[in-house]
Structure formats: structure tokens, C-alpha cells
Amino acid sequence: MSFRLSSMSYRARLLWGLLIVNIPMFVILSANEIVAVRNFAFQRELDAISTEGQFLASDVTDALLDHDRARVNEILSFATTQHQIKEVSILDINSTVIASTDPTLVGRTHPSTEPVPVAKIRGKSFLKSFPIRGRMMDGRIPRFLQMNYSFEKAYGDISSTLVWEIGIDSVEILIILLVAWFISGLLQKPLIELRDVSNLMATGDFSRRVHGGDRRDIVGQLAAAFNNMASRLEVLTASMQQEIHRATAELTSSNKFLNEKREQLEASNRKLRELDVLKSDFVSMVSHELRTPLTSIIGFAKTLRTLPLSKEQQQQYLAIIEAEGKRLSSLVEEYLDISKIESGTISLQRKPVNIATLICSAVDLFSVSLRKGFIVDLPPSMPDIMADGAKVVSVLHNLMDNAIKYSGDSQEIVITGHLKDDGIAVSVRDFGPGIAPEDIDKVFDKFYRGKNPATLRHHGSGLGLAIAKGIIEAHNGKIWCESLQGKGTMFSFFLPLQSQPKLETLPPAGNAYY
Amino acid sequence: MDGHIILIVDDDSNVRELLRVNCVAQGLNVLTAGDGAEALRLVEQHIPELVILDVMMPEMDGWEVCKQIRDKYQDSIKVVMLTAKDTARDKIIGKNILKADEYLTKPFDIDELLATVHRLLLRESA
Ligand SMILES: Nc1ncnc2c1ncn2[C@@H]1O[C@H](COP(=O)(O)OP(=O)(O)OP(=O)(O)O)[C@@H](O)[C@H]1O
Ligand SMILES: [Mg+2]
């Protein structure tokens, strides 16, 4: 067999089994039946021949005794019209044909050689002889009537029986297969249900149960056991699900907590790094800015002591020492200011002050030669404001200092005061090269000095504007910068008239760094 | 010490003057420059025996000047770096990478500087 039973479905295997058992059984049964039918048919034919033959024999005997030859022929030819009689002959003791329905045989020895007392099958015929009596006829004494009886009817009966037999057998086999198919389907049904429900369980659905759990047979027991297992699994998975949910929720919340903590850590880390950068900036700036004036002071002091110098030289070097000393002290002042601003410990000594007076004192800080470029434009009268005069002067001084230092060849600087509804605004404008738009936001940053070499040529620590911003904001004011590259720069600040009450409700600026 | 030409480079005019007056007192011929470009121009013009070089200067800093001198004149011109930068990193850059002959930090002691200058010039003439 080119296929393997084991690879076939359960039902196909069953049907194949049935076929394999049934077909030989039907073959044997059919063969048996056919033999029986054949025997029966033969017997029937033989009986018919005997009866027929007896009648014929007595009729022929009568005619022969009457010596009526014509009647003999008549009887014979009539006989051939009857039933399946193919040939009738009258033979003498030597089987020579005296008279026959087959004229070719007359006068010759009958081909069946000798008379047959009992039925004998020859090919598809029966041969049977019956004794007769009669007078000499054509010089021979008739002794037998031999009949050749056709076998065809019997054969026809047998073959039609065979056809019927095969037909009925096939139908029977078909019915058996159909019934088997149906029954196997019925038997399979609970298995199929088990399979489907198991598949559902595999996807996590434990709610389904199979039918037939109340039956007593093996399938019922299996169904009951299966349902029992499904129920337990359902309970188990439900509790596991709950456990997982709880654990997941716990994890998410602790994750969230960790994330928050991490973000906090990252933020403080970032702040620390920024502080670190600021600190190292500060250290290198301080080291450079402090070392340069110190070099001059120490160097010239020693030079004055050791070298023989002219009076003018001595004066010049002493002036340098004084200037560098001042520069040093103002640097130290600036560092102290910025650290106070950053730590939020800046303290303002507020008194009613007049802005015009402050502008004048700021201008006075410059040498006469520098002062001549200043143009001061103020409204006729300005109200006093509550402010720390010295600190506002230092802001103004830095703005003017920057305007001088960073405006190149243009020597004109305009200082304007404006009276606003709720305060006063002051701006310091120069006509220098200005500040690039992308750098405007940075000028108030600590240590920012720009990249312009012309700017860097001047001394400076990059703290001036950062301090100015801190001071103005401590007054609840605002400082800002407008600049057009190539056209000049204008720094302005605004101080409110009534800043005192507001300030006390506000925390000190920059209190992040304690 | 007479006749040796040295170049003093510093963007701070006071420091420049301080160095100048002390070196002149030693009998040296002193040139001064306020920035890197001027310094290189003077080096080319006068080929000094020694350069005292500040590091932090606008535009072209002392490192760059030192590098260009080394590229062009190798060891024939002595270089003394004089700077406020006193970290180990800066010293390594100055001495090992740019091959300055000396590395002094501000504020410096005038006598120490002059001694260094003498030493380098003597070694040169020896
Ligand atoms: N009027 C101006 N025109 C062009 N650039 C300016 C002007 N004012 C300030 N700047 C730029 O802003 C930078 C910061 O100024 P800031 O006053 O804070 O520091 P500084 O003047 O360099 O040093 P110092 O601490 O001595 O004041 C300057 O270095 C300069 O590049
Ligand atoms: Mg300034």
C-alpha cells in the first residue's frame, strides 16, 4: 500500500478497516450463494427435462407403434419449439440416428457417441436419453430418444443472480460505511469538543466546559476529569492574574518613584556640573585677573627698591602700583558682589535717592578726559526713588565703562532718564560696533566677555553686567539690552518707584546656591 | 650681558614696562610687543635670542606664537613662557608639547626671571 494507515485520520482508519474486513467476507458469501443458485438452477432444469423427456418418449413410442412416421416428425419438430430443447434425435442401439430435428445427423452415429442415461452437461447443454419402443424403421430398431437441452437459461439465471448479488453487496458495503462514518462522527464529537476547548484553554480562556460530563462511560469520565481540570486552572490563573496585576502595579509605582528620584538626581547632578564649570571658570578667571595686577604691583615695588630710577619713572611706577592696586580691590569687590548676589545675601541700604544725583556721581568716577564724551539727557524733575544709591551708581558706572571700552572710536555716549507711570528708566547708549543678536542674551552671564578681540584687549572680568543685573533685580527692577550691529548698543534699566513693600514679600534673588 | 637682543610679549602694558625696565638695567637690548602678530613680526625682523611670552592674549595667544617660533627657528630662539596659567595641564602643554625652555607663573619674582634669562643666554653663547 502506497499510504500508511498511521498517517490517516481516525475516521478514515476505521472505514479502511471495515472495508478490508468486509470485502473478502462479501466475496466469500457471494461465491457461496452463486454455487447454491447454480445448483438450484441445474436441478430445476433437470427436473423440467425429465418430465418433458418422459412425455416426449411416450408420445414418440405411441407414434412409432402406430408406425406413423409423419407424427414422429411432427412430435420432434414440435419439441424443438418447447423450452430450451435444441435437438431431439431417435437412436438405435448403436447410437445411429434414425430420425432427428437436425437432418444432417440422420443415418450417422450421434456425435455424443453413446446414449446418455442420465443428464450430462456438455458445454452449454444437457444431454439426456429416454428409452422408447417401436417397430423397425428404415431397417433400424429405435431404442432411445436423445434430447439436447440448452443450458443457456440456467446460465442466464446464474449471471443475473450474480449481478444482483454484486449490486446488493455493494449497496450493503456502502450502507455499512455510511453508518460507520456516522457513528464514528458521533464517537468523535466529544473528542472534537475536547480539542476545541483545549485550544481555547491554550489561548487563556478557561471559561468553557465540555458536554457529557454526566455520562457513565469512558468519554463521560474523561469529560468530567477535563472539566474539573479546567475549573482548577481557571481559579489558578485568576489568582495568578491578580498576583501579576498587583506586582505590576507595585513595579510601576516603584518605577515611577525611581524615575522621579533619578530625574531629581540628574537635575542636581546637572546643577552640580554647571556649578563645577562655573567654579573652574571662576578659578581660572580669578587667577588670571588677580595675578596680572599683582604682578605689576609686586614687580614695580621691587623695581623701585632695587633699580636706580629717575624721579619721573618713580612717579610713573608708583602710579601704576596705585592703579593696579585699585583694579585689584575693585576686582575683589566684584567677586564679593557676585558671590553675595548668587548666595542671595545682597543687602540694600535703601534711602530716597534722586536719579540725577546718581548719574552725576557715576560720571564723576571717570577721569576728566573720558568724561567729555558723555551727553546726559534728563527730564526737568525726577521723583526720588527708594534705592541703594551706591549700588545703583556702580551699575551706572559699569554701563558707562562698557560703553567707553566697547564702542571703539566713537566717543559719544548718551545717558537718558525717563519718567514712567510706576518708576524710572535710565539708558546708556553708545555708537560702537554693537553686539551680535545671538550674543545679546549672554552679556548678562557671569564671565561672559564675547569673542571680539577688540573687546578682549580691554581689562575686564565679565562680571560687571551680571552684577548689574543682580543689583537691579534686587530692587525689583529690570535690566535689558538693545543693540544693532554696527549701529551701537543701548543698555537700559527700570527701577520701580515703590519697590520697598514688594521686595520684603519676595525671597532673595538667586537663593538656589546656599 | 650686553648686546643680547630679547623680545618681551605681553598684552598688559604695565607688565611689559616692568619687564622692559628691568631687562634694560641688565644691559640687554629689549624689544616689546603687545600682541602675537606684532611679536612674530619683530622676531622676523630682529631674530632675538630670547622671547619672554605671555600666554593669555587676545587674537593670537602665546601658545600659537611659541609654536610658530619653534616651527621656524627650532631651538635657536629661547622661549620663556610667562603666564597666570599655573595648572599642571598648562605646564605640560608649555614645556612638553610646545617645547618652551622655561615656564614661569605670574606673579613672578623679577630676580628669578632675570636669572633664568641669564642662564638661557649664557648657555646659548657657551
Ligand atoms: N556697550 C557695549 N558694546 C558692545 N559690547 C558690550 C557692551 N557692553 C558690554 N559688552 C559686552 O559684554 C561683555 C560683558 O560685559 P561686562 O560688563 O559684564 O564685563 P566686562 O566689561 O568685560 O568686565 P567687567 O567685569 O570689568 O565689567 C563685554 O565683555 C562685552 O563683550
Ligand atoms: Mg564691564
Image: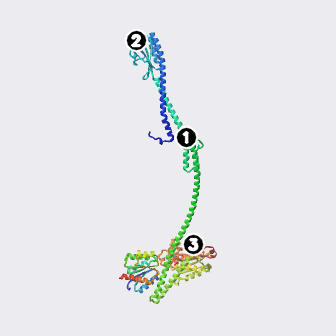
Residue pointed to by mark 2: A140
Q: Is residue A487 visible?
A: no
Find out if the beta carbon at label 2 lies less than 8 Å from the nearest ligand 1 atom: no
* Front in this rendered view, residue B112 or A104: B112
Where's the N terminus of chain A, which quadrant?
top left
Q: Earlier in the sequence, mark 3 or mark 2?
A: 2
Q: Position of residue A68 (x, y in %)?
A: 45, 10
Q: Amino acid at mark 2?
A: Arg
Q: Residue sitting at 41 percent across and 86 percent down?
A: B26
Contact (Cβ within 8 Å) of mark 3 with mark 2:
no
Q: Earlier in the sequence, mark 1 or mark 3?
A: 1
User: Element under label 1?
Assistant: helix
Left or right: A482 with respect to A72?
right
Q: CA distance from mark 1 to mark 3?
A: 83 Å
Q: Amino acid at mark 1?
A: Leu
Residue pointed to by mark 3: A512
Tell me the subunit letter for badge 2. Answer: A
Q: Position of residue A407 (x, y in %)?
A: 50, 77
Placement of B107 over or under A174, stated as above or below: below
Residue pointed to by mark 1: A187
